[in-house]
Image (spheres, rainbow, N blue to C red):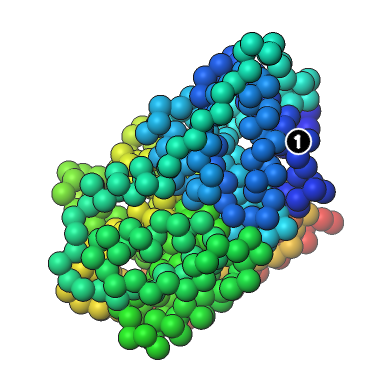
Amino acid sequence: MKKLFGTFGVRGIVNRELTPELAYKLGLALATHLGNRGKVAIGRDNRTSGFMFESSVVAGLLAGGCDVLRLGLTPTPVLSFSIHHFKCDAGVIITASHNPPEYNGIKLWGSDGAGFERQREREIEKIVETGGTTVGWDRIGKALSADAVSAYTRALLQRVPKIKRKLRVVVDCGSAVGSLVTPYVLRELGCEVISMNSQLDGTFPGRKLEPVPENLQDLAKTVVACGADLGIAHDGDADRTLIADEKGNLLSGDRVFAFAALNYLQHRKRPRIITTVATSKVIDDVAQKLNGQVVRTRVGEPEIVGEYKRNGGDIGGEENGGVLFFDWTPCRDGIMTAVQFVLALAESETTVSELNSTLPQYHQVKQRIECPNELKPRVLQQLSEQEWEGQLTTIDGIRIDFDDGWLLLRPSGTEPIFRCFAEAKTAKRAAELAELGMARLKEAVEKSSS
Ligand code: MG
């Protein structure tokens, strides 16, 4: 059977890997999977191919007897929220998140607003292969539409207090769909908002969409030039957020998660924080402050959601700035993340850089080494059999926790590489740990290929 779904839905280059024909088949397969009935919410980001794929998926759903709730241009968290808000049986988002404009993707969601589990994706793949079931002319689905952005914005603003302090915020949405929500929400919250890269443009001319420091230098400079209190940036579908302080320094995704968590969980008893093995120890510091607990999972949003569904939890997050507020919607929500960070800042009555210094500082080194996919299991086996001077865990790759830092050696799920993450309280120790990790990796790859 052909594997269609990757780590975040079906993704590929438009009209080469991902075609309107495949989109139609996916729509029909989803309708068939739902028993040729029910209502499905569908949204898209503003890529040039968005309307084309939306039309194809909608045609498949209608031909398969499902009603469709068309939401139009929608950030991913707004789609997730809309599924339960409008009582739909499933959802579809058409986005390629942070990938370049020539890509697009299709991801499926359950009635609770969480992404389909692996098992359900497998079932869809099976139906695509054998062909879905269409219905007769008198059972074709109906196409409805709804204003998801307004519903989401209203519900979000009902949950959070207005800020009492005047904050000047620069928002950079990368010319993508975050522009439809975040600048307005922050203004309603009481911020003075300066927006940049916030005209929708499916060619994304302003910057690359991945919210990482090298792509956000214009934001950093604008924050300083405007004398703003902070800068906020999203990826292409606004499920991730990065923050710049008033001096133009970018906070890592871990720390955005940490401050969002501190604010969101401040009144909860023993909160359960779900994160992956790749996240900074700063999350443990947060848990300690809140008298809560950290649960570590394998890397990836589905792993965090899976743990939440099995055992419950209050908040989830990743080192890349994706945070999930489970009792809001079980999907990474960059808009809510930005709001929680702004609330934390407003309450602190300090600057972002001062707020940032209230949690311990860590230094991180991230490196990679090439490793063919077929060698990965052998390399991992070798690494786990070696003597390490720290505490070894094997949740995902191997992680070794030392007294003064940690090291993670993990095979990438998508590329033929092994990743090496090191973190410590000093830059020197982080570099030492990374060097140790890379040396051990190099040796293990060489041994495995001989
Ligand atoms: Mg994204």
* Residue closer to the observer: 56 or 173: 56
Tell whether 336 sits left or right of 141: left
- Residue at 56% in and 76% down: 214
Q: Residue 400, can we see it?
A: no
Q: Decide: is 217 above or below 99.
A: below
- The residue closer to the viewer here, 60 or 13, is 60
Q: Is residue 381 left or right of residue 187?
A: right
Is the residue marked by circle 1 packed among few (<14), some (14-19), or many (20+) residues within 10 Å?
some
Residue 136 coordinates in the image, percent (x, y):
69, 11
126 or 77: nearer the viewer? 77
- Let me know if residue 55 appears in the view: yes
Q: Classify residue 188 by image quadrant.
A: bottom left
Amino acid residing under circle 1: Leu
* Helix, strand or loop at mark 1: helix
Query: Residue shown at 67%/38% (left/top)?
Result: 55
Q: Is residue 112 left or right of residue 357?
A: right
x, y (%) of residue 257? Answer: 37, 59
Q: Please tell me whether residue 139 is drawn above or below residue 352 in the rendered image.
A: above
